[in-house]
Amino acid sequence: FHKPDGIYTAMDWEVYPQGLYQILKRVHDDYAVSAMYVTENGAAFDDVVSADGHVHDERRQNFLANHYEVALRAIEDGVPLKGYFTWSLLDNFEWAEGYTKRFGIVYVDYPTQRRIIKDSGYFLARVAALSQQ
């Protein structure tokens, strides 16, 4: 079942950032934990190297931006979120999918092992730099 206006990843998972906010808030409200960590959050999209040699993964950038936004809102609403780890640094071997799904913020050309920082990787670098200000 797909919502007509839904956004889906290459894994056919619905993108629903509000769900992250809801679960963070619920765990905080129901269990009064002293610290919370998002240990793996990311999305697979059909990334390709463009003619300019870059990987323009706007959908992943939007995914990350929207999830970071709701994580920050949860913190503002009192959730003790102490860490957030994006999945994944590199495109990698996924147990059920092999090398067919790309989650990384760095593209891996598997035959040559060449790495290309995706636009989402540069986006994450800018976010990290802003958080240091």
Image: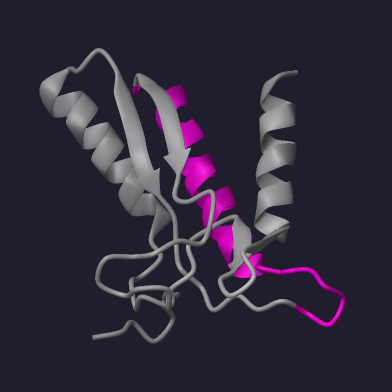
What residue do we see at 72% from left, 59% from top? 119
Q: Where 1 sits versus 104, above or below? A: below
Farthest top residue in view: 34
User: Looking at this view, is 132 or 97 the one in front?
Assistant: 97
Q: Where 95 sits versus 89, above or below? A: below
What residue do we see at 22% from left, 25% from top? 28
Q: Residue 96 sits in which quadrant?
A: bottom left
Q: Quadrant of the C terminus?
A: top right
User: Which stretch appears magenta?
Assistant: 50-79
What residue do we see at 29% from left, 35% from top? 24
Q: Quadrant of the N terminus?
A: bottom left
Q: Where 10 sits versus 71, above or below? A: below
**How many numbered badges does the structure rendering display?**
0
What residue do we see at 12% from left, 27% from top? 30
> In the drawing, does residue 47 fall left or right of residue 83?
right
> In the drawing, does residue 85 fall left or right of residue 55?
left
Q: Where 49 sits versus 1, above or below? A: above
Is 62 a magenta residue? yes
User: Looking at this view, is 80 or 114 the one in front?
Assistant: 114
Where is residue 62? Give x, y as percent. Answer: 60, 60
